[in-house]
Amino acid sequence: MVDRCPSRTYRGDMAGLDSLDALSSTDPALGLRSVRALQRLHERMEALHVARAREQGWTWQAIADELGVSRQAVHKKYNRRS
């Protein structure tokens, strides 16, 4: 089942990204933590929306087309989560 409250889903992934200023910080540690936080957010958003698409009957090919990847890649990554 997909969490119906995306803001709750994403909030925890933003830990380490205190503000948008962190993205342009000259402090490498802060910048790298920001990158890691954005990567976690990206993964969660992608998983959430792939699950929603599958619940709505989208094919793996349609999802892959929207993500700009192959059907095999998206199926391999998310099939076990469906």
Image (cartoon, rainbow, N blue to C red):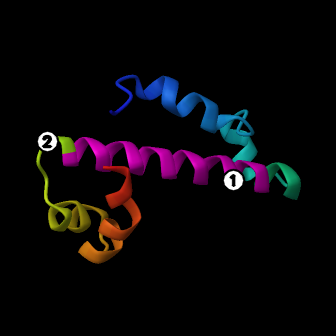
Q: Is residue 27 visible?
A: no
> Any magenta on residue 59?
no
Q: Is residue 27 left or right of residue 9?
A: right
x, y percent for residue 50? 30, 50
Image point (59%, 49%), residue name: 40
Which residue is nearer to you in this view: 57 or 37? 57
Q: 76 above or below 22?
A: below
Mark 1 nearby-residue class (10 Å; few <14, some 14–19, many ≥20)? some
The magenta span reads 32-54
Q: Are marks 2 and 1 in contact (CB under 8 Å)?
A: no
Query: Which residue in the structure is indicated by mark 1?
Result: 36
Report how far apart the C-alphas of labels 2 and 1 lie in the structure.
Answer: 30 Å
| Dot 1 amino acid type | Arg
x, y percent for residue 25? 80, 50
Q: Residue furthest front?
A: 80
Query: Which residue in the structure is indicated by mark 2?
Result: 56
Image point (68%, 55%), residue name: 35
| Dot 2 amino acid type | Gln
Q: Which mark is residue 61?
A: none
Q: 1 above or below 66?
A: above
Image point (17%, 68%), residue name: 61
Q: Is residue 42 left or right of residue 13?
A: left
